Image (cartoon, rainbow, N blue to C red):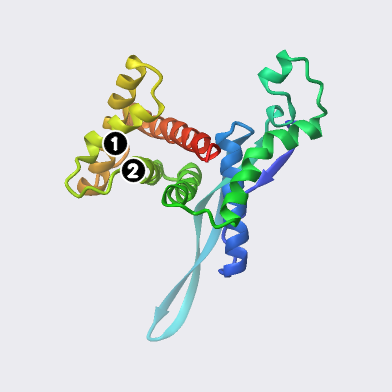
Amino acid sequence: MGNFKGYIPHNFIQDPFIDNIISQIETFTTLLEIAGYVEFQFYESMYYQPLPLYIYKENNCDNVAHLEHQLSDRLISLKLKDDLFANSHLLSLLGSNLSPVDNLKRNLSNIIKYFNLLEDNAMSNNLNKFNLSLRWYLSGIVAQNRTVALIHFCILIESILGSNRADANKGIEIPERAALFVGQNFEDRKSIIEALSKVLNKRNKIIHNGDIFRGRQDIKYYLDAIFYSRKILQKGFEIIMKM
């Protein structure tokens, strides 16, 4: 099952109809990822492209030189996990023997329900924020620059957990809300507050001081931003499914 792959389309000609289709594909893909049914895989591709350098003298082109310019593509593919076609742990304990196709339908039922909510115009403010946050998550995942990615993840977290109070200290408010939202116990909540406080502090340094990523500690901020963004989306999706 794990040999099936899909690809996220990018850089199509701007067209509202195509944009809407791509948006739905990206939403579906992101929901599959946070549910643990697909895995993003990244491949770096380096290649060289000749660039002509025109040399002019008195408005006449006397010579053409060619420079080799190194370019880089980051290819992103999706790998379906076997869990998408398998019984849940509970059904396995109960001795269920559903076929892979039946398991696929069952595992996708909540995602189908989510799209039905969108089609039924059940776009409450919270659902609208969650839907936009899925896009921020995907844009952070596929970003080639970790600095940009971290900003996208912070937008996601603030979008879901931030208040509308202009006087709120986001650096304190958001980590505390995240701890209450996804924390399992006191120690877990304490770790969440500590980790997200550092992530948001790094985000502020990037935006206000022009800071960039430096060394292993900054990579940890990036990984924590991904980890808690995903946990917040998982919890948010769980709540939406109870609506």
Q: Residue type at mark 2: give it.
A: Glu
Residue 211: where, in percent of width, then height? 25, 43
Residue in the image at 51% along x and 64% along y: 51
Question: Which residue lies most toward the front here?
Answer: 243
Distance in Å between CA atoms under marks 2 and 1: 7 Å
Query: Which quadrant is the N terminus positioned in?
Result: top right
Left or right of residue 106, residue 134 in this image: left
| Disc 2 and disc 1 in contact, CB within 8 angstroms | yes
Q: Which mark is residue 158?
A: 2
Label 1 neighbourhood size at 10 Å, few (<14), some (14-19), many (20+)? many
Q: Amino acid at mark 1?
A: Ile
Question: Can residue 44 be seen?
Answer: no
Q: Is residue 29 left or right of residue 177?
A: right
Regarding mark 2 in the picture, which secondary structure is present there?
Answer: helix
Who comes first in sequence, dot 2 or dot 1? 2
Q: Give whichever of 163, 67 is nearer the camera.
A: 163
Q: What residue appears at the point 50 percent right and 72 percent down from the top-left corner?
A: 64
Q: Which residue, given by chain and number where applicable, does mark 1 sit on? A: 174
